[in-house]
Amino acid sequence: PGIVVPSVFSATTISPAKDLITRLKEWMTKPGVIDVTVLFGFAWADVHNLGMSVIAVTDNEPALAKEIVNDLSELAWEHRGMLTGMGNKSLYSLEEGVKTAIEKAKTASKPIVILDHADRTNDTTFIIRELLKQRAENAAVPMIYDPPSAQKCVEAGRGAKIELEIGASTGWRDGGKFRVRAEVLWAGHAKYTGTGPMTINREVDLGLSAIIQVGGLWIQLVSRQHSLIDADPMERFGYDPLSFEIIVSKSKTHFRAVYEELGEEIIIVDAPGQCPADLSHFEYKHAPEGLYSTMRK
């Protein structure tokens, strides 16, 4: 269909991706149809075949396959604004998203979830800086990848109050390290058996880890990269996720299996991490011409 879809908009539990899958399933019930697949693609790959694809396999009925592909491609094109983010009103800037989350949390009965989807390395500091700047209270920021800070917390021990420079462990579009004074709430080697839908019965080893309090923020530091896709990062350390007013997830779509129900609302923030929805931050050299996207023309 000639569309470049940032993965945050490919969640098949919400429209318009949900509508595409519904139509796909309808086609799958037709005689002669063997398989139909919608591939949303990877928007940050600078390759000649960048973009969304639709594949249909039939029992030697090429005309039917073409009809299916055209139908789904036309439906995707109708929703191109939502799929690319250009017409998606659910996408907030960093400042506005945090402000909205703080306001909504005042009257919410469950946590407001801020989705920092652009942070693919789980170590950017943009969201932490903004939460502190806007004086957010009772906000959880799990799974920040920062081995040096985690080790310092383990050495200092529970109850210690120490100076840390957190985050920015990978060195690319990460916001830079952020100096904080923190109280160590927990520190040690974090290892547990997963209970979430995507980690069920799987050993999760986060290495040396720590939980710290910085102002109104509960921050978890880990030594192995892992996204927040279930409640284990809080529950396995004695914290009830429902006790927080705001929870930050640095995921894309997988977290929805738990947090669509656990959270009151999901606020998608397009912070300037490694993979933002706004593709104009990057220069593409190999992508084909004519794609509908936020890429620089």
Image: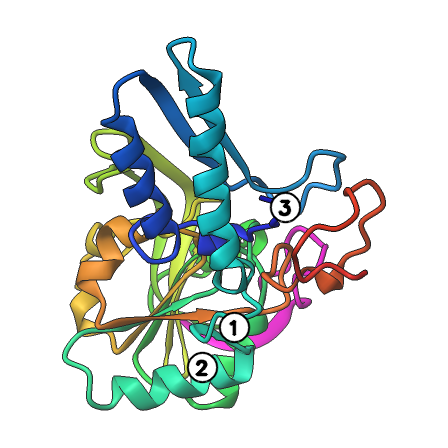
Q: CA distance from mark 3 to mark 1?
A: 32 Å
Is residue 95 left or right of 38 when viewed as pictured? right
Q: Are marks 3 and 2 in contact (CB under 8 Å)?
A: no
Q: CA distance from mark 3 to mark 2?
A: 33 Å
> Residue at coordinates 46% horizontally, 59% vertically from top-left?
153
The disc placed on residue 260 is none
> Residue at coordinates 69% horizontally, 67% vertically from top-left?
176
Q: Which residue is mark 2?
A: 98
Is residue 101 left or right of 289 when viewed as pictured? left
On the image, the x and y values in percent for residue 45 come to 69, 41
Is residue 261 a member of the stretch shown in magenta? no
| In the foreground, 185 or 4 | 4
| In the foreground, 87 or 58 | 58
Does residue 236 sit above or below 126 in this rendering?
above
Earlier residue among tags 3 and 2: 3
Where residue 47 sits, quadrant-wise, is top right
* Secondary element at image label 2: helix
Earlier residue among tags 2 and 1: 2
In this picture, which residue range is highlighted in magenta?
A: 164-183
Q: Residue furthest right?
A: 285
Does residue 35 sit above or below 114 in this rendering?
above
Q: Which residue is mark 3?
A: 2
Which amino acid lies under the numbered mark 2 shown in the image of this protein?
A: Val
Mark 1 surroundings within 10 Å by alpha-carbon count, few (fewer than 14), some (14 through 19), many (20 or more): many
> Residue at coordinates 77% horizontally, 43% vertically from top-left?
287
Earlier residue among tags 3 and 1: 3
Q: Using the rendered image of the protein, determine whether residue 228 is visible from the camera's viewpoint.
A: yes
Which amino acid lies under the numbered mark 1 shown in the image of this protein?
A: Ile
| In the foreground, 208 or 71 | 71
Which amino acid lies under the numbered mark 3 shown in the image of this protein?
A: Gly
Q: Are marks 2 and 1 in contact (CB under 8 Å)?
A: yes
